[in-house]
Image: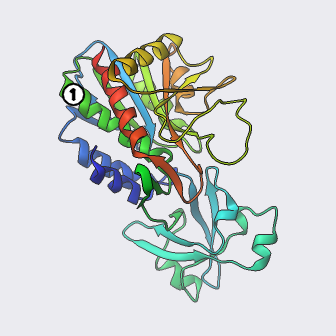
C-alpha cells in the first residue's frame, strides 16, 4: 500500500467542480502502470489496463469532496460562500480554512460569534470568511469568485491502524481502485480494466454517468464509504452492523447484482478476507446508481469502506479495511 500516494491525494483540495488537483496527482502516479490515461471534458480521469480486451470492467470512485466556493466579496474584504455538497454547517464557524486559487493556497478563518452557534438554521450563506483583507480590492487580489474553500485539516495516524483526515469520502476510494488496478496488473489480469476517478458525485453525479457512457463496461465495481455502526446510539435496523476494521462492506440492495456480490464473496473467501454486509431499501446513493442506468444498463457491485464521522472535518478509517478492499478487488479483477 503506497502511503505516499494516499497522502498526496488527501492533501489536495477537490471540492465538487474543482477536482483538478487530485486528478493531477492520480495521473502522475498512474502513468507508470496504466497503458492509457484518458481525461474527458469535465475532468473525469480513466486509467486503462488491457485496452484491447473485449471484456470491460469499470472501477469507479469519486475524486470530489464536500466544501464551499467563493460566491461574493464584500466591501470590507470578507468572503461569502455557497456550499458544494452535504456539509455540516455547525462544523465551520471558528475553524481555519484554506482556499485553492488558480496559483496558490490562501488561508483564513470562518468568522465565529456566539450567535453563530445559537443559530439552529445555520447555513453556508451565513458564513463570512476572513482572509485578513481590509477591503474588497485587497481580497480580490488574492482570491477569485468560484475558488474552492475547505477546512484546513491534518492527516493524522491514530492507534490500532486507524487514521483521520478530511474527505476520506471518497479520495480513499480513488486510492483503493488505483492500487487494486496496480495489483491486478501484477497478478496478470487479462480483462480490460477502466479505473475511473470521477467528478461531481457530491453534487450532480455527472462524472459517473459520463465515464460509464464512454467506457461501455460489461460490469462495474464501485468503491465508496459507508457509515459505521460502532459509535453513537443509533439503531442498526436499517443498514445493519458495520464496524471499523471489520473488512470491506458489500451491499444487499435491489440495484446491486446478486451474482457479482456472490463472486466478491467467493474472492474474499479464497483470499481470507472478512466481509461485512449492509442493506439498502432501493438505490445506493453512490455513483453506482448512475453507472447502473447508463447505456443499455450495467450490472454493478458496491464495495464500501467502513467510515466513522462522515462529512465532518475528521473522518476516521482503518488501514486494515483499506488493504482488504484493495486485495479483494484485485482478486476479483484477476478472476476474470
Horizontal side of 39 relative to 242 (left or right) equals: left
Q: What element carries label 1?
A: helix
- Give percent across and percent down for residue 45: 35, 39
Quarter of the C terminus within the rendering = top left
Compared to residue 104, the image places residue 22 above or below, namely above
Residue under the image location 39 percent in, 21 percent down:
268
Compared to residue 159, the image places residue 217 above or below, namely above
Q: Can residue 170 be seen in this view?
A: yes
Label 1 Cα crowd, 10 Å radius (few <14 / some 14-19 / many 20+): many
Q: Is residue 124 visible?
A: no
- Give percent across and percent down for residue 161: 40, 50
- Give percent across and percent down for residue 36: 23, 33
Compared to residue 267, the image places residue 131 above or below, namely below
Quarter of the N terminus within the rendering = top left
Residue under the image location 61 percent in, 20 percent down:
253
Horizontal side of 189 relative to 180 (left or right) equals: left
Compared to residue 75, the image places residue 102 above or below, namely above
Residue under the image location 60 percent in, 82 percent down:
77
Q: In which quarter of the image is residue 263?
A: top left
Q: Which colour scheme is used?
A: rainbow
Query: In the orientation shown, which residue stands out farthest toward the front?
Result: 160
| Viewer-closest of 256 and 240 | 240
Horizontal side of 91 relative to 57 (left or right) equals: right
What residue did someone put label 1 on? Answer: 185
Residue under the image location 59 percent in, 41 percent down:
228
- Give percent across and percent down for residue 178: 32, 37
Query: In the orientation shown, which residue stands out farthest toward the top?
Result: 259
Horizontal side of 288 relative to 177 (left or right) equals: right
| Viewer-closest of 205 and 328 | 328
Q: How many labels does the image show?
A: 1
Amino acid at each position: 500500500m503506497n502511503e505516499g500516494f494516499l497522502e498526496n491525494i488527501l492533501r489536495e483540495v477537490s471540492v465538487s467542480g474543482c477536482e483538478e488537483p487530485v486528478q493531477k496527482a492520480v495521473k502522475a502516479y498512474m502513468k507508470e502502470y496504466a497503458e492509457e490515461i484518458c481525461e474527458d471534458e469535465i475532468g473525469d480521469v480513466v486509467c486503462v489496463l488491457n485496452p484491447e480486451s473485449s471484456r470491460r470492467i469499470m472501477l469507479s470512485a469519486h475524486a470530489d469532496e464536500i466544501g464551499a466556493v467563493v460566491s461574493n466579496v464584500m466591501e470590507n474584504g470578507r468572503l461569502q460562500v455557497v456550499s458544494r455538497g452535504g456539509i455540516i454547517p455547525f462544523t465551520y464557524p471558528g475553524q481555519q480554512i484554506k482556499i485553492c486559487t488558480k496559483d496558490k493556497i490562501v488561508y483564513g478563518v470562518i468568522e465565529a460569534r456566539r450567535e453563530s452557534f445559537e443559530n439552529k438554521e445555520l447555513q453556508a450563506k451565513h458564513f463570512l470568511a476572513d482572509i485578513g483583507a481590509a477591503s474588497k480590492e485587497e481580497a480580490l487580489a488574492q482570491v477569485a469568485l468560484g475558488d474552492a474553500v475547505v477546512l484546513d485539516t491534518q492527516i493524522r495516524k491514530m492507534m490500532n491502524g486507524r487514521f483521520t483526515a478530511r474527505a476520506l469520502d471518497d479520495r480513499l476510494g480513488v486510492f483503493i481502485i488505483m492500487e487494486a488496478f496496480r495489483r491486478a496488473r501484477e497478478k496478470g489480469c487479462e480483462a480490460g480494466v477502466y479505473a475511473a476517478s470521477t467528478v461531481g458525485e457530491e453534487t450532480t453525479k455527472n462524472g459517473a454517468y459520463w465515464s460509464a457512457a464512454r467506457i461501455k463496461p460489461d460490469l462495474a465495481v464501485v468503491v465508496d464509504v459507508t457509515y459505521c455502526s460502532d459509535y453513537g446510539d443509533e439503531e442498526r435496523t436499517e443498514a445493519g452492523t458495520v464496524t471499523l476494521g471489520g473488512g470491506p462492506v458489500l451491499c444487499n440492495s435491489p440495484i446491486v447484482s446478486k451474482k457479482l456480490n456472490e463472486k466478491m464473496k467467493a474472492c474474499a473467501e479464497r483470499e481470507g478476507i472478512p466481509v461485512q454486509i449492509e442493506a439498502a431499501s432501493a438505490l445506493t446513493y453512490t455513483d453506482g446508481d448512475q453507472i447502473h442506468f447508463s447505456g443499455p444498463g450495467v450490472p454493478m457491485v458496491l464495495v464500501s469502506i467502513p467510515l466513522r464521522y462522515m462529512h465532518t472535518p475528521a473522518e476516521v478509517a482503518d488501514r486494515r479495511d483499506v488493504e482488504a478492499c484493495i486485495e479483494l478487488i484485485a482478486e476479483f479483477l484477476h478472476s476474470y
